[in-house]
Amino acid sequence: MKMARASEADVDAALEVTRILDDLLKRYMPSSGSDEGIVWFDQDDPDQCQIALGRLLDAARKGSMFRVVFGMAVLLDPRNELLDPDADMLARHPKIVRAMNACKTGKPADEPARQRAPGPIEEIMALAEKYANDKVKIRLARVTESSAAIARRETEHERSRVALLTALEAAFELGATA
């Protein structure tokens, strides 16, 4: 899901509003910056309530609370796969971690370590060694080299494709959390 990014002013406003609400919940009158000392907040005093509401509204007008709160909701939405749903703190989603590691190592993110089993080319070469003359062996060697070169190019192409996709995911992740 796409949405507008919260600006620094939006975040500052959200922090100021939460500070004021926190003060009120602790029964302190929110300070105006020029207040001296602690003033206890009495929610039954209409004058104090009017002052507190005015300070809340002044703080909220400095930015968009919606962009801050909804932006966090987008980050936390498990469908977006930005944050690890199993972590107790803000941590990158495991898919993003794997993608970033793949960018660093140059290996596809989900490529398991494996040994290549002998394929048809190796089997043909073994038969050529056993039954064919030198001319056939030379031709088969050329075919094998060409096939191996094609396989290498296909592997390099796949690695490039995966690296590009993982780099795009990482760039999105950095843009989404910056």
Image: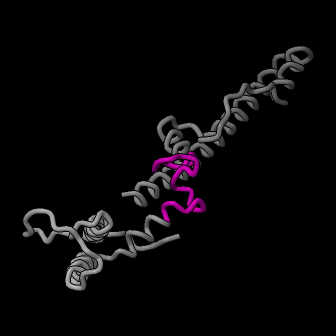
Q: Is residue 150 left or right of residue 25?
A: right
In the displayed structure, 42 sits above or below 118; it is below
For the record, the magenta segment spans: 74-95
Q: How many labels does the image show?
A: 0
Q: Considering the image in quadrants, where does the C terminus appear?
A: bottom left
Q: Residue furthest top?
A: 130
Main SS of the magenta part reads loop
Assess whether residue 108 is covered by the magenta stretch: no
Q: Is residue 67 left or right of residue 26?
A: right
The image shows residue 163 at horizontal and vertical percentages of 53, 46
* Residue at 15% from the left image edge and 63% from the top image edge: 38
The image shows residue 131 at horizontal and vertical percentages of 92, 16
Q: Quadrant of residue 130?
A: top right
Q: Nearer the viewer, residue 92 or 151?
A: 92
The image shows residue 120 at horizontal and vertical percentages of 85, 30
Q: In which quarter of the image is residue 149?
A: top right
Assess whether residue 93 is covered by the magenta stretch: yes
Q: How is the image coloured?
A: one colour
Q: Which of 45 and 66 is in front in this view?
A: 45
* Residue at 70% from the left image edge and 32% from the top image edge: 148
* Residue at 81% from the left image edge and 21% from the top image edge: 137
Q: Residue furthest right?
A: 131
Q: Nearer the viewer, residue 146 or 177?
A: 177
Q: Is residue 75 left or right of residue 116?
A: left
* Residue at 44% from the left image edge and 64% from the top image edge: 72
The image shows residue 8 at horizontal and vertical percentages of 26, 66
Q: Is residue 18 left or right of residue 138?
A: left
